[in-house]
Image: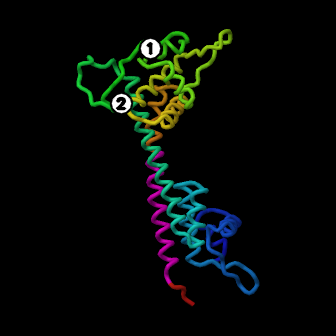
Amino acid sequence: MRPSDLAREHGISTQAVRNYERDGCLPPAGRTPTGYRIYTERHAAALRAYLALVTACGHTTAGLVMTGVHTDRLDRALTALDRGHTQLLRDRETLTAVREAVGHLTAAPAASSSTPTTPGTARNRPTPNRPTPTGPLAIGDVARRLGITPATVRTWEAAGILAPARDRATGHRAYDPADVRDAELAHLLRRGGYRLDHIATVVGQVRTAGGTEELAAALDGWQHRLTARGLAMLTAAARLDDYLTLRSEPRTA
């Protein structure tokens, strides 16, 4: 095969094929007596695997996997692939946490406190809806609202969960309604056992969406993207397995 034969299958340029070979994502090509590259079905399978990995995990991980294979460091390649699966799992857990927390923040007020609960889970320990503040609150007001200490609120700020403005005259923290929402979301997730770094990720998603209502409307799209990534990873694994099988077969003259 020529570079153009490999390029045509995927709608990419012949220069891209040469670049992938140069970067170690394809095995070295053979050469004709006049110096032209010669590719085989092994190269075609490697290219299919690499491009499938790019779709599933991104260029960096795909490159690590393929260069690991081509330098006979299969464990390194599989470790890179494992990290992609781990990141997908973390993203799924984050989505689940956002769904549960947003559901609590937008739900009707909880039933009486006599309702049995299971300790340690945000799902079974809902926080009743409170009136939305109309103006900025001081750190003590936020702490009393949630039944925690001001020191805990400051810890959340240090972890990147909260980012209140400061009063220009006094320098004191001023929590606007969005900050209070973020604090309530953090409180729910913390009671559910989530780590501070995980909570910071979730709150960041809420801020990016513009609020709990906007985020709730975007969750289905987020779920679809995660499903697409999961399916892409299955395809990439199949393409990589095809290539590894072909690579292990003895070469014929």
> Colour mode?
rainbow
Work out whether residue 127 or residue 246 is closer to the camera in this orientation and state it. Answer: 127
Find residue 181 and report its horizontal and vertical position in percent: 48, 21
Q: Which residues are magenta?
A: 225-249
Amino acid at dot 2 = Ala
Q: Is residue 243 left or right of residue 14?
A: left
Question: Mark 2, mark 1: which one is toward the viewer?
Answer: 1
**SS for tag 2?**
loop
The N terminus lies in quadrant = bottom right
Q: Residue at x 65, y 75 (%)?
A: 28
Mark 2 → mark 1, Cα distance in angstroms: 19 Å
Residue 236: numbered disc: none
> Which residue in the protein does label 2 denote?
122
> Which residue in the protein does label 1 denote?
144
Q: Is residue 232 magenta?
A: yes
Reply above or below: 92 against 121: below
Find residue 79 and report its horizontal and vertical position in percent: 51, 60
Q: Residue at x 40, y 23 (%)?
A: 106
Reply above or below: 31 against 243: below
Q: Is residue 93 magenta?
A: no
